[in-house]
Amino acid sequence: MKAGFYIGDYKYEVRDIPNREPKESEVKIKVAWCGLCGTDIHKFQGMNGASVVIPPIILGHECSGVVEAVGPDCTLFKPGDRVACDPSYGCGKCNWCKQGFPNFCHERHGVAKGFSEYVYPPEKNVYLISDSLDLKSAAFTEPLSCAVHGLDLIEMESGKTVVMYGMGAIGSLMLQLLSLSGAAKIIVVEKEAEKRKLAIELGASEAVNDMEIEDISQEINVDYVIECIGLKKTMEQAIRIAGKKGKVLLFGLGNPDEFVSFNQFEAYKKEVSIYTSYLNPHTSQRAINLLEEGKIDTKKIISAELNLDEIGTELQNLTHSKKGKVMVYLSGEY
Ligand SMILES: [Zn+2]
Ligand SMILES: [Zn+2]
């Protein structure tokens, strides 16, 4: 079977790997769709994703598909089941897993490398989806579950003002979650006019550029700032524009070698809190619930549908990734 590898040195290659049967509690899933994540691009550019990268590695982790076979210890699934994956494995036994934080598991690793015709996650990382949900949308389970976790951390109260940076794929999901969470006013900061238009379509009250937000934040108290880009400049501005009692969530993945600075005295006078969010502990089912209920528009976010071979060029040029979410079709089944 074919799989798309990052082989180091800014190189991507589709290789043939053995197609095997599932062991123990593994579920063998014929992958239908897999999203191209910002962390895949990070890995390709020689930076780490959620974990340290030692190539060659199969890329992708946002996948959905149909169960082909199950291991002898698997009790929850059967061939033909339509499923989405949580790619992040927690052992369930270490002190972090026991405290409910599998994202910090000592043995944490990816178990659904979706740029592959088949994946073999253990059954506890697999989620059944209803017939009402198409497999392409179901592949948004992982990125959406990460956004759900981020909003859990800041314990967002309804009726407040939120500023959100970046209308990339993750920002577009986050924005929709914010409107569902009862924000009174959502101001999106985005440099591209076309994406500002999309922001309004997906629930923003206003969409502005990074100059305009400086003035706006002087006039109103910004209660929450969610940064979904990961750039030093926007992260620093996000912290600066937060209002009194403001909570800042630095959600976008930054450059590991770069530092962010802010004026402690200014932050002190406002009691600003800064949050970061790591992965998706226990939020996959809630992401699926949102997708199944049609609460999240995934169609408007997708910029291209490519096959495994076409991803190499995309990773080089980022032509479609700049515009939105790139979906990789494996079986392409709905
Ligand atoms: Zn992802
Ligand atoms: Zn663990």
Image (cartoon, rainbow, N blue to C red):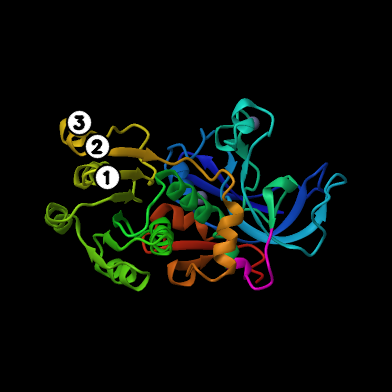
Residue drawn at (20%, 52%) of the image:
221
Badge 1 local density, few (<14 within 10 Å), some, or many (20+)? many
Amino acid residing under circle 2: Glu
**Which numbered disc, 3 or 2, marks the residue that appears first in the sequence?**
3
Residue drawn at (56%, 43%) of the image:
281
User: What is the C-alpha distance between the residues marked 3 and 2?
Assistant: 10 Å
Quadrant of the image for the C terminus?
bottom right
Does 292 lie within the magenta span?
no
Badge 2 local density, few (<14 within 10 Å), some, or many (20+)? some
Quick one: 258 or 221, which is closer to the camera? 221
- Badge 1 vs badge 2, beta-carbon distance below 8 Å: yes
Q: Is residue 201 left or right of residue 236?
A: right
Residue marked by disc 3: 264
Residue drawn at (27%, 43%) of the image:
235
**Which numbered disc, 1 or 3, marks the residue that appears first in the sequence?**
1
Asked whether the viewer can see residue 34, the reply is no
Percent from the top left, x then y, of residue 258? 30, 33
Q: Which residues are magenta?
A: 128-136
Say what secondary structure mark 2 lies in: loop
User: What is the C-alpha distance between the residues marked 1 and 3?
Assistant: 14 Å
Quadrant of the image for the N terminus?
bottom right
Amino acid residing under circle 3: Gln
Which image quarter: residue 29? Answer: bottom right
Residue marked by disc 2: 271
The mark found on residue 246 in the picture is 1
Which image quarter: residue 135? Answer: bottom right
User: What is the C-alpha distance between the residues marked 1 and 2?
Assistant: 7 Å
Percent from the top left, x then y, of residue 251? 39, 46
